[in-house]
Image (cartoon, rainbow, N blue to C red):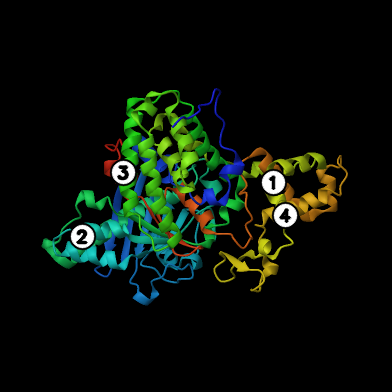
Amino acid sequence: MTVHLPTKALSLRPPNEVMRLSRLGSAHQTRLSFLRALLRRMRDENWRVAKHAFDIDERGVGKAIYTVDVKGRLLSLVAFGHELAPDERTDRVIAQAWDATFVLFDGLPNRQDVARLAANVPRQEAGRYLATELVLARANRSVRLFDHVLDSLAQGRQPDEASVEAIGYLMRTTAVYGNGKFGIADRDMIADRPELSAPFRAEMLTVYLIRIFTLDLVEHLARLRGGAKAALLDGRLRRRFGIGNATGLGMAPFLVKHPALVDRWITARETALARVRELRHASRESVAVFRATLQCSRRCIVRWVTSDEIQARRIDELGEDLSRLERFASEKVFAGPCPWEAIWRFARENLTLEGQEYAVTLLIEPHGALIDDLAETMAIDETASFRIDGRMSCETLRRSIARDYAWALELDFSQSRALARFWYVSEEKLEPRLGERFEEEGMEREQPLAIAREVAALAAALDREERHTRVAAFLLAHPEHRHAVRRVQIAGRHPYSEIRDNLIGASLRPIDLLRCKLAFFGATRFDPRSDRWVRITLFQGAPFPDELAAQCSERWIYGE
């Protein structure tokens, strides 16, 4: 196959291609994903993790404290184990009890701190917190696998490897709250601390420590039950346990509400892809990593199971895509000019969206020295983009809409299908929800997430305005358009800030929003339970703290 290579420097993929929901909903983890960037920093700075306290009885009730020493500054995971009746165990956010609850504490809690946390953390949203609490979380056991592993270890044998691989975790978190939620520390309090400044760094550290706790817990319970005959998990098998997560609509609006931050995430990934594509030659080492990652990925996909018909079909297609990619990426291609660009162009022209986005992961993977610095560019002070430029003329604003929102102007909001949904916040849990506009009550509580509709209305109003009118004067007369004006001006400075699809249309699949954000976290094994919530796995295969220094390869995330 002939591939025509560029004669000048490559540009980033255009927002109109990247920011479509169908492509965002096909995203995969990369080297820049938050959990992988966390582990690299832990390794490079020699963060020290220690079990400070572990006082849990045979029922799994009690508390444990794990400390992380970050160059002399301490962080602590305080974990509380609870006895939970089977009929109380649910992934739903409305649950009132959990197998375990957690808090990431800034420092080392003293006896009074622990007593206060013990009275509040198990209550989660209903508790009262101080600025020393950075992250709040809770988790439930995967009962079938947890009991199997516990029984096996108590009897002195290893659990069934196939069962471990099929589920992949002993506990799954049902919420991990940060950034000032329910009175815990605001993001501003840690944003200038290098170890926690990257997006969701504190949350990823919390989940990593929860993984350690769950494995320590099952081994501890096995010793209490089995005594001297009890076994510890084999080291290789132990690493095959990650942490599960159940994520629903509560996460979906984040990508809409944080446009400048999302632009930073996407820009970093697209810059990484462009840097790789611009390489004129492929080193022997990078080719070896690419091929090894591709082979590991093919094995991983076989173990990726889901009951969702749509995702199951996409997994099958992805397996075929990777076979095509492997056949194309021959010695001849790598010996030629710009081999990574050739592989990318083949992927764009021959693979499904899922396959194309996985190709992004594969192309980035061998090039840590070239792109890992981008992981530290993915945070931003969003307040800087919030201010509206009132000096801008209405004509300039109109041109910005024509350039960045042509997709929105093509939608017909006189049609009921274009207005079928509305976003609101539930009174019970203060969580985002999605309602059916023409079937359910509550439309008067609609959240401002219908960006396409708002911008279309703004464009119509601007058509009636004098071209030289300043935006400030326009908004004095039409304050209802302030939100849309702000979005348009942000998009002018941050090209990847806007999702270029109708977020209230009948064809919306909220899971595409979830998938995009979770991929940046570093999630694997997406298992949609509907189009509104998904189960995933985090840190499966990841090295433990005492293994980080010796772990040179990052192919653990591909099942190696």
Q: Check disc 3 and report the residue beneath it.
A: 296
Mark 1 residue type: Tyr
Local crowd at mark 4 within 10 Å, few (<14), some, or many (≥20)? some
Q: CA distance from mark 1 to mark 2?
A: 53 Å
Q: Check disc 4 and report the residue beneath it.
A: 454
The N terminus is located in which quarter?
Answer: top left
Task: Give the image quarter of residue 390.
Answer: top right
Quick check: 423 left or right of 456?
left
Q: Is residue 490 above or below residue 280?
A: below
Local crowd at mark 3 within 10 Å, few (<14), some, or many (≥20)? some
**Could you say which is closer to the camera, residue 435 or residue 201?**
435
Q: Is residue 375 above or below residue 56?
A: above
Q: CA distance from mark 2 to mark 3?
A: 22 Å
Q: CA distance from mark 1 to mark 4?
A: 11 Å
Q: Secondary structure at mark 4?
A: helix
Local crowd at mark 1 within 10 Å, few (<14), some, or many (≥20)? many
Marks 1 and 4 close (CB-CB < 8 Å): no
Mark toward the start of the polypeptide (2 vs 4): 2
Mark toward the start of the polypeptide (1 vs 2): 2
- Numbered mark located on residue 192 in the image: none
Mark 2 residue type: Asp
Residue 81: percent from the left, percent from the top?
A: 33, 65
Q: Check disc 1 and report the residue beneath it.
A: 405
Residue 56: percent from the left, percent from the top?
A: 28, 64
Mark 3 residue type: Cys
Q: Check disc 2 and report the residue beneath it.
A: 160
Residue sitting at 46 percent across and 36 percent down?
346
Question: Can residue 393 be spotted in the picture?
Answer: no
* Closer to the eye: label 1 or 4: 1
